Image (cartoon, helix red, strand yellow):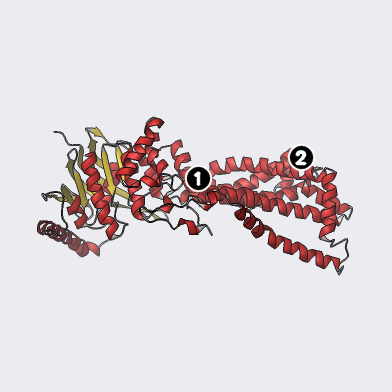
Amino acid sequence: MQRASEVTVPGGRMDARPGSRATPAYYLSAFLDNFLPLAFVLLLWEGVARMEFIHPALFPTVTEIFKKMWELTVEGIFLRDVAHSLARLLSSVFFAMIVGTLSGLLMGTSRWVERIFVPPLNFFLAIPGIAIFPIVILWFGLSEKAIIFTLAFEASLSITLNTWAGVKSVDASLINAGRALGCAGANLFYKILIPAALPAIITGYRQGFSRAWRILVAGEMLASIGTGIGYRIFEARAFLASDVMYAGVIVIGVLGFLLERVVLRSLEIFTVERWGMVREL
Amino acid sequence: MSPKLLVRNLRKVFQIDEGFGRFSSITAIDSVNLEIKEGELVTIIGPSGCGKSTLLMILAGLYEKSSGEVLLDGHPIDGPGLDRGVVFQEFALFPWLTVRNNICFGLKMKGVPAAEHDGIVKHYLGMVKLDEFEKIFPHRLSGGMKQRVGIARALAYSPELLLMDEPFGALDAQTRTSLQQMLVDIWAETKKTILFVTHSVREAVFLSDRIVVLSRRPSKVRTIIDVKLPRPRVRLSEPFLRHEEELEALIAEEIGEDRSAGAAL
């Protein structure tokens, strides 16, 4: 998209930005960019599986996996699993966004908050979220709460770290300009610091999502909570239902992929990339 | 008539954190006295690192002074305020706001009714000749255009005093010359009081009613030169070049002293 931004001639005319009104050709190329490589992998898989070098129970064909996925979907099991997993993920990351963004902002602006928060932040960052899961289970039982707490804990650390770093590296001249234009206190936060640190904050959300997503699956397995994709995979193991296990893994991959490419990437395109704060490639 | 801006015995000492628990202090401004009249265009010039930008930042309220007095229209300046407009060397436009919203920023903070924003934005964009660029994000503008937006943003909420910190320092020679002319035109039209920091003698002679020459650090006012050249000024005219030469010599003297003392720093 860089092509259209070569219009900085004084008095020159401005082209409409291509991203502001997407054409059908844009959607087609976006689709091909994203799915062609995946389609290739699936095709290769299908071919190898059909040769039956490996026992089909261990390595089923893609068609079989999708057939199973369809069955599970029709039975309503998969949709419920996906919905529950996503609900857990989104609610915990939502909490983490609030906690992480606020604490990161405070750390980035107050020397005292920074001094107090840095040691525990580094301490907790060193601990994999899943390591505290057994302790969390002691508190909350084998419940929804235990999963959400662990996820939120994990994601909020990433978000705090990135927001903190982002706020610290905000150009001093932007803060000065904001103050000169009458910003102070809360105004300075949401009118200057948050938008100026947004590239780093989005990176934090991205990391938070992916870390939470990983732990979610493990958490669902450990908590044996009855629903969720992680639970489904774990349960299928007991019956050696390899097609269900593969189907579950694929769904996890696809959902993670969609979260990144559709939600977070769009957020990035419509904010920091449009503002020229991160480079478009 | 009482002065628009009065600076008395201004002093600034920076505490510098050297890391690992060591601190040192550096006196940037020793004692500066200054009086600026309503509607004057005054430039501050001095050897590099002499504290001229520090002085301007204190007047903007962005740095705290160590001691002394700063009065704008008789009221002490304490912190930043919308009675002053600031133009920065780094432009400091907000990349997440369009040109229009950058200019509106101060208006909103001042509480100017939204109905008036349109007219004000158009007026000042016209003044800096960027009428067509309202909806553009700053990253798509050239350096000169960015600074024109910076000037429009600082003027839009009609501050009493315009503070400009080497605003054209980052621009190429042609852009610089044309923006200097634009500033003089804007000044003639708005009759603002302008305080302008520069390190370019030619720029100072072209723009100023008076030129404040600061000494090397810790800075004092070394001399104040009245530029009695008629306007419009021609850069290559004989009186212009004479002024430029005089000022060059004065500053060279200061820098020379700086060099001899440089070993101690």
Looking at the image, residue B127 sits to the left or right of residue A109; the answer is left
Instruction: Kindly state the secondary structure of the residue where label 1 is placed.
Output: helix
At which x and y percent is residue B231? 14, 49
> What crowding class fits label 1: few (fewer than 14 Cα within 10 Å), some (14-19), or many (20 or more)?
many
Relative to B114, does residue B58 appear above or below in the rendering?
A: below
Q: Nearer the viewer, residue B75 or A268?
A: A268
* Identity of the residue drawn at 15% across and 34% down: B2
Chain of the residue displaying label 1:
A
> What crowding class fits label 2: few (fewer than 14 Cα within 10 Å), some (14-19), or many (20 or more)?
some
- Spatial distance from mark 1 to mark 2, Cα to Cα? 32 Å
At which x and y percent is residue B104? 39, 38
Whether residue A162 is visible, yes or no, is no
| Residue A143 badge | 2
Q: In the rendered structure, which disc, 1 or 2, sits on the residue that comes first in sequence?
A: 1
Chain of the residue displaying label 2:
A
* Identity of the residue drawn at 50% across and 58% down: A2
Whether residue B71 is visible, yes or no, is yes
> Which amino acid type is shown beneath numbered disc 2?
Ser
Instruction: Kindly state the secondary structure of the residue where label 2 is placed.
Output: loop
| Residue A107 badge | 1
At which x and y percent is residue A27? 63, 53
> Which amino acid type is shown beneath numbered disc 1?
Met
For the C terminus of chain B, which image quadrant?
A: bottom left
| Residue B191 badge | none
